[in-house]
Amino acid sequence: MENEMLEQNKQEKPVSLLTKALLTGFVGGVLWSMLGALAAYFNFTSVSPASFILRSWLQTGWSDSWLGQLISIFVIGVISVLLAIVYYGLFRKMKSIWPSAIFGVGLWFIVYFLLQPIFPNVPQMAELSMDTVVTTICLFLLYGIFVGYSISYDYLDSVTKKNV
């Protein structure tokens, strides 16, 4: 009776795959947008997270400061949760890293081509420097691999554990 009450004898409740996917999406959005802000700070790219999220609608001084960057990074993390749900629903059963990479590059095309009119503060594709294009493609590619492959790995790992 006494052993059942000890902390080390208790088992943790398993976390659902969807919850893991949502957490992975948020962490991925925050991590890679922070790296995007860092890349913009060191002039690897002319587009920062605040350029997309805040500066497109707010033309105030604080929106391009560190506070604007932090708010934008958080908002991108929340948007990334929605993208993780999409990936979870469509591609979680994929066993390769390539669907994740294609997902990331596809997001880049969606943001820079399809959604570009929504972001008036971001220059047209023809006006972007090659450094900006290469840096942002790499960031989106790494984001897609991080989020997508993590979700697929968790799913396939849980399926493997159930079959054993």
Image (cartoon, helix red, strand yellow):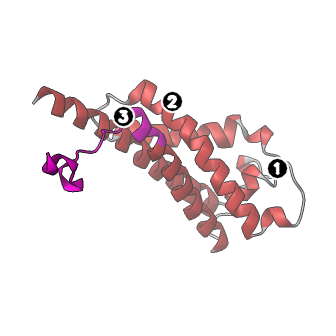
| The quarter of the displayed image where residue 81 is located | top right
> What crowding class fits label 1: few (fewer than 14 Cα within 10 Å), some (14-19), or many (20 or more)?
some
Q: Earlier in the sequence, mark 1 or mark 2?
A: 1
Q: Earlier in the sequence, mark 3 or mark 1?
A: 3
Mark 3 vs mark 1: in front: 3
- Name the amino acid, label 1: Ser
Q: What whole-number distance in Å separates the C-alpha atoms at marks 3 and 1?
A: 37 Å
Q: In the rendering, at what x and y percent does residue 117 appear?
A: 79, 38
Residue located at (28% from left, 45% from top): 12
Question: In the rendered structure, does residue 3 fall within the stretch colored magenta?
Answer: yes
Q: Quadrant of the N terminus?
A: top left
Q: In the rendering, at what x and y percent does residue 138 appear?
A: 50, 55
Residue bearing mark 1: 56
Residues in magenta?
1-22
Q: For this rendering, which residue is in front, 160 or 49?
A: 160
* Residue lying at the far front of the rendered structure: 1
- Name the amino acid, label 3: Ser
Mark 3 vs mark 2: in front: 3
* Residue lying at the far left of the rendered structure: 164
* Mark carried by residue 16: 3
* Mark carried by residue 86: 2
Residue 108 appears in the picture as rendered: no
Q: Quadrant of the C terminus?
A: top left
Q: Are marks 1 and 2 in contact (CB under 8 Å)?
A: no
| The quarter of the displayed image where residue 93 is located | top left
* Residue lying at the far bottom of the rendered structure: 42
- Name the amino acid, label 2: Val
Up-down relation of residue 158 to residue 121 (above or below) = above
> What crowding class fits label 2: few (fewer than 14 Cα within 10 Å), some (14-19), or many (20 or more)?
few
| The quarter of the displayed image where residue 88 is located | top left
Dot 1: what SS? loop
